[in-house]
Each structure stands twice: as structure tokens, then as C-alpha cells.
Amino acid sequence: MRRAVDRATGPSALSWWSWLVTLPFAVTVMSGLQYISGGPWAIVAVGMLEHAAVGATMLAGWAVLRATPQRVRVPVVFLVFGVIGLLRPLLFLAAGWVLGVPVAAGDLVGRIFINVVTTITMLSLIAAVVDLVRDHIGVYRRLRAAQRASARDAERTVARISELRRSVVETVLAQLDDAAAAAAAHGIRPADAARLLRGLAQEVVRPASHRLYSDDVATAEEGALDGPVRVRDWIASVLLGMRPAPALPLAVLFAVLVVPFGVAQYGLLFCLPPLVCGFSVVWAGNLVLGWIVGRVARIFRAMMLLVGYGVIGVLLSLTTRLVVEALGRVPDMVWVEMVTYPAIAFGAALVASLSARVRRDQAALEAAVQANVLEAADGRSALDHEREGLARLLHSGVQSELIAAALSLGAGSAEDASDGVREVVSNIRAELSAPRSEPDAADRIGALVESWGSAIPLRSSFGDGVWERLGEAGRAEAVVDAISEGLANAVRHGDGSEVTLEVRAAAHGGVSVVVVSGGALSTAVPGIGLRQLAERGDVALRELDGRVELVVAIP
């Protein structure tokens, strides 16, 4: 409830949409046509002029809200909404007078009461929808950008590893192949072959290995979690996520809206039977519609809601008409319910759907950001592993093999050593072309901590004996997950202060991960990540002296 009030009274309390969305009602069902003496064009003209004047009052209200202190904003917003509703019937009379169209005041007090209730409800609903739309567009934009960044970074990592192989391995192999081809074309004496291989080791392979050791290879740039959103994609995501508004609250909301009209039209006691019957129809209709919508494909749910609420509106109007006639009165304007109910109901459904969608996409965004950190760490680790592996292979393997082959060929008695040179180059090609093994736990965890350390103030430590225990793949994977979840929690619950990470040896050959951050827990209910960690070890999340501590003991 508090969140709904915050949305209704927040920055979107009065906006262009507040005026625009109410425009169709102002010139049709809410135009006061029963009080106008004239044809359709007179009704539209009075309604348009009146709504233009209402727009001016909204603009004045917007200026008042901009100057309103935050501590009193909620009551002031509802007061402004009420004043707009109060002025609306008066502006209706003024519009008729300006245009020279005869208009009747009718039950002015009753009309003011109806307009105040209706305006507060409508403007609150519109403000909540606009606020939710703005929130969801922001979350949706960051989510799609994070997903694009994840795919882009994965492609960049593959491209960089490929570029690393091309720039280093292929360059080295090309020079070795050129030397082998020259030796085969003209023949080469053993002593010359020995000098050639030593030269290749010193002038080609050794510098290449040193460059790999000393030059840091650029990793994927961190993409901003923002980007353009195609309106079509966003609308599709909203429509596919549509769900019915809760049945009982929606029935209560519409009853609150029609009570002022019923009391003004028929009196309090007389309007109770049609109100109770109408409430029953709406509540039952909402329950049935909810059951139906839950069993149709997502692509048809928005259309099903529109049709369903339209049918409920028709049933509501017919019920009200029959009950009023049964009580001996002439139904007046009950058809308005047939038009207003679907609009109010679909707006409430949109609020419920967007609220759920924002929560779901925020969770998906958090997961995508965490996945990006993991993928960036894995990419950095894979790239570093490839670079360091190639450097070691060139320095310790290829260089040694060239020198050893040079000694062997130099001691030979054959007249032509070109076949020996070709064999050495062929063996080296096979070594350099072989895929590298997967990075070990130390590489993965080190890259992960480095990635997080670039994003948050982080102090980490690893106890004695930890790395030996992480040789077991399942335990290492659990530690990676525990660190990721712990640091994600630190961002979620933290206050921006330094986060400490400690990985230490535990009893019975296990490992404990401890993450401590400033801040406070927003909920005592563990999330999915913690519940998954609990399946692999003992998890404790607690708040102590203004710090949040997560301890995961992995056997």
C-alpha cells in the first residue's frame, strides 16, 4: 500500500499523461452531456474547452507540487487532485457560458462530490501507471544492455584469444616455416642448421615469449548498462507479461467510484441494492476472468483482459439497470459503467502487471550484472591463461626444443639437415596448435575477485591451505558461487563502505567463505542464490552492529 501511495504521489503525480489520458473521458462519458442542451458538436465543444481549462489547473497544480517539501508531499498531492475535481463542474458551467451553449447546473454539490472522488482515483491510477512505465523502461533498458554486453563480451573474448593465437603463434610459425622452406629448397649443412635453429630460438621465439609475459592483454571494455529500447520490443514485453488485477481490490475500487454517483442520483438507501448486486457481479466476473486468463497463452492475455473486462462492464450495466427498474425507478446513465469499468479495470491490471514486471526484470538485471561479472572474470582468466600458457610454451618448450634440436643437428654427420629442420618445425607446430587446458581454481577466483575489486571497495584474503583444497572441481565451483553471491549481496544491502572477503580453510578439509559489508538486511527471507548455496554447504546471513555478514561453509 505504501509503495502504491509513493507511486501515485511521486514525480509522475501530474504530467502530460494525466491530461492526455483523461481527454477521451472528458469529451464522452464525463462530459456532462445530460446537462447540455445541444447536439453532439455542442457536447464535444463544451467538453474540450472544459478539459483545456482542467489542463490549466493541472499545470498550476504541477507548479505547486514542484515547490512542495517532500515531508508534506503526499497530502498536498491528494489535495491538489481534489481541488482539480472540485473545479471541474464549475469549469463545465463556465465553458458553456463562454461558448453560448445552454448548460444546467443540476445537483451541483453531488456533481462536485462525484468529480472529486473520480478525479482523485483516476489521477492516482494514471500517476502510478506512468511511474511504473518509467521505472520499467529504465530497468528494461539496462537489462537488455546487460544481456547485449554479456553476448558482446563473450564474442570479444573469443576474438581476443583468436587474435592472440594469430598474432603470436601464427607469426612464430610463419617464420619457422619460412626457415624450413628455405632449408628444403637449397639444402642446409648440419652446422648451418644448428645456427639457424639457435637464431630462431633467440631472435623469434624468445622475444615473443617475453612480450607475452610483459604485455598485458586488453580485456573486454565494461559496457554501460544503458542503451536504446525499441518501443515495439518494450510494448511486447509488457503485453506478454499482462495479468489480471486482484479480483477483490478491483471490485472495491470500482464500488468506491460509483458510490458518489449512486448517492447523488438515487440516495444512500436506494443505491445499496444495486451497489451490492453490481459488486457481486464485478467480483465474480474478476475471479472467472482471472481463472481464464491464467489458462491461455501469454500472447493472448492482454486481448483476453480487454474483452473480459468489457463483458464484465456490460453485465454490470445490465445488472444495475435491472435492479433499479425492479425497485421502481428509471435507470439513468447506468450505461456509463459499461464504458468506465473496462478502462479502470485494465488500468488496474496494467499497474499490477507492471509492478510484477519491474520486480521480475530487476531480479533478471541483477542476475545479468552478476553473470557479466562472472563472464568478465572467466574471460579475463581464459585470456590470461592462454597468454601465460603460450608464453611458458614458447619460453620453456619451443625455445628449449629449438636449442636441443640445434645441438643434435650440429653433432650429426649427414650432408643435408633440411629434413631435420622440417621435423622440428612440424613438432613445434603441433605443440603450438594444441588447445590450452581449462584455467585452474586460483586463476578463476583471482580473476573474479579482481573484477569485483574494480567495481566496489574490496579487501580480500585467502588463508593457508585454501588453494590445495580447491583442487576438487565441485568445491572450487561452490566457492566461486559463494563469492559471487556474497559480493552481490554486499552491493544489494551495502552502504558503499569497504567490503571484506575472507576465504579460509575449515574443518574436515572444507573451505569457508566470509563476506562482510556495511548496511542492513532488507529482508530476512533468503533469496534463490542463498537457497541454492544452502544445498552445497551451511549458509548463515546475519546483521551485526551495522554490518551484514554472510558465512558459507563448504565441506
Image (cartoon, rainbow, N blue to C red):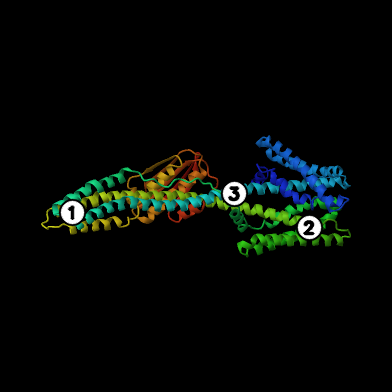
Q: Nearer the viewer, residue 24 or 406?
A: 406
**First in sequence: mark 3 or mark 1?**
3
User: Residue 332: which quarter of the image?
Assistant: bottom right
Which of the two discs, 2 and 1, sits closer to the camera?
1
Left or right of residue 335, residue 423 in this image: left
Give the Cα separation between the discs numbered 2 and 1: 99 Å
- Crowding around mark 3 (Cα neighbors within 10 Å: few <14, some 14 to 19, many 20+) is some
Instruction: Look at the numbered disc 3 and give the secondary structure of its residue.
Output: helix
Tell me the amino acid under the disc marked 1: Ala
Q: Nearer the viewer, residue 26 or 205?
A: 205
Q: Residue at x 47, y 55 (%)?
A: 532
**First in sequence: mark 2 or mark 3?**
3
In percent of width and height, residue 503 lies at: 39, 46
- Can you identify the residue that label 2 sits on? 276
In percent of width and height, residue 235 lies at: 62, 54
Give the Cα separation between the discs numbered 2 and 3: 40 Å
Asked if marks 3 and 1 touch (Cβ < 8 Å), the reply is no
- Can you identify the residue that label 1 sits on? 405
- Can you identify the residue that label 3 sits on? 137
Q: Residue at x 74, y 49 (%)?
A: 22
Tell me the amino acid under the disc marked 3: Ile
Asked if marks 2 and 1 touch (Cβ < 8 Å), the reply is no
Left or right of residue 416, residue 292 in this image: right
Q: Residue at x 35, y 55 (%)?
A: 438
Tell me the amino acid under the disc marked 2: Val
Give the Cα separation between the discs numbered 3 and 1: 65 Å
Q: Residue at x 31, y 46 (%)?
A: 212
- Crowding around mark 2 (Cα neighbors within 10 Å: few <14, some 14 to 19, many 20+) is few
Instruction: Look at the numbered disc 1 and give the secondary structure of its residue.
Output: helix
Instruction: Look at the numbered disc 2 and give the secondary structure of its residue.
Output: helix
- Crowding around mark 1 (Cα neighbors within 10 Å: few <14, some 14 to 19, many 20+) is many
